[in-house]
Image (cartoon, helix red, strand yellow):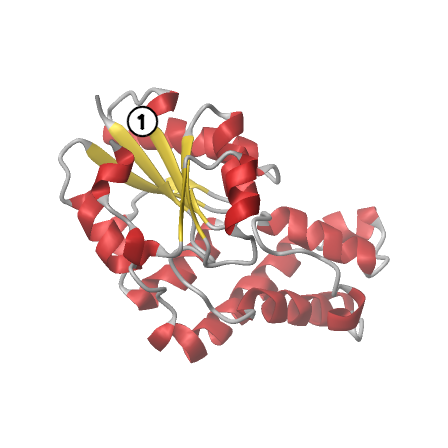
Amino acid sequence: MPKLILWDIDGTLVFFRGVGRRAAGGAFEEVFKIQSVAERTANVHFAGATDGRILREMAAFCKIASREYEERLELLKESYLSKLQLEIDRFAHDAVLPGAADAIALVSARTDCRQALLTGNYERGARIKLKPTGLDHHFKTGGFGDDHEDRRIVASVARRRSSEYHRIEVAPENVIVIGDTIHDVDCAVANGFRCIAVCTGHDTKESLAAAGAHAVLKDLTEFKDSLID
């Protein structure tokens, strides 16, 4: 039976040292002409969240009215993505996490597997992050933050879109999410997928296991393709 491997990006494949938070903060300052965004939005959690949810929560912490936020959302997104590109250019040389490239290569070598992305990033942001690392060409499709603010729905979209792209029908139990947060685990479990979690983010081995991960690895250097059988 065909298998579909859905990869998270931030904290799983790459680590960019807070570039998303800085880019988003700069975008709010530019578009809404407000100051001290970093201080106001310090309690907004980025790990495992979709870009749409992150920006909406930042707007709430900055006390921006909903109507004003919606009216300027496209400008905000464009500003954010432009600033993200500038930030990424500074850190791309050493952003790939240990074992990530080898793990992707192991999956690529299997004729029964297809790979795609499952990320909270807007698709353009995902490409901005992956292209300079040399990993982008492995992923032709996936589910992205553009699709929905709810990561569970993004996971469902990733399966459907990937099945259509690869012209295969993958049963939910043959979809495997690889990620570093309890949110990756949650969206997998909610859709009947399996999940391999890695402890390269903020969540602990215990919390990832408790959330329902089928396997928890220190990092992707421990990845073996037998884990997806």
Along the viewing direction, whichever of 197 and 53 lies nearer the viewer? 197
| Left or right placement of residue 138 versus residue 196 in this view | left
Instruction: Look at label 1 and name its amino acid.
Output: Glu
Q: Is residue 112 visible?
A: yes
| Left or right placement of residue 45 versus residue 133 in this view | right
Q: Position of residue 199 (x, y in %)?
A: 46, 55
Q: Position of residue 188 (x, y in %)?
A: 48, 32
Along the viewing direction, whichever of 42 and 123 lies nearer the viewer? 42
Q: Is residue 181 visible?
A: no
Q: Position of residue 28 (x, y in %)?
A: 71, 66
- Number of labels in the image equals 1
Along the viewing direction, whichever of 229 and 52 lies nearer the viewer? 229
Task: Identify which residue is drawn at 46% across, 37% down.
Answer: 213
Quadrant (top left/top right/bottom left/bottom right) for the N terminus: top left
Q: Is residue 31 above or below residue 170?
A: below
| Left or right placement of residue 209 versus residue 30 in this view | left
Q: Residue furthest bottom?
A: 90
Quadrant (top left/top right/bottom left/bottom right) for the C terminus: top left
| Left or right placement of residue 181 versus residue 218 in this view | right
Q: Position of residue 137 (x, y in %)?
A: 25, 54
Along the viewing direction, whichever of 6 and 86 lies nearer the viewer? 6
Q: Quadrant of residue 37?
A: bottom right
Q: Is residue 167 above or below residue 14?
A: above
Task: Identify which residue is drawn at 62% across, 56% down.
Answer: 46
Q: Residue furthest front?
A: 206
Helix, strand or loop at disc 1?
helix
Task: Identify which residue is drawn at 36% across, 75% down.
Answer: 94
Q: Quadrant of residue 142?
A: top left
Q: Is residue 229 above or below residue 74?
A: above
Badge 1 density bin: few <14, some 14–19, many ≥20, Cα 10 Å: few
Residue with the mark numbered 1 = 164
Task: Identify which residue is drawn at 25% across, 23% down.
Answer: 168
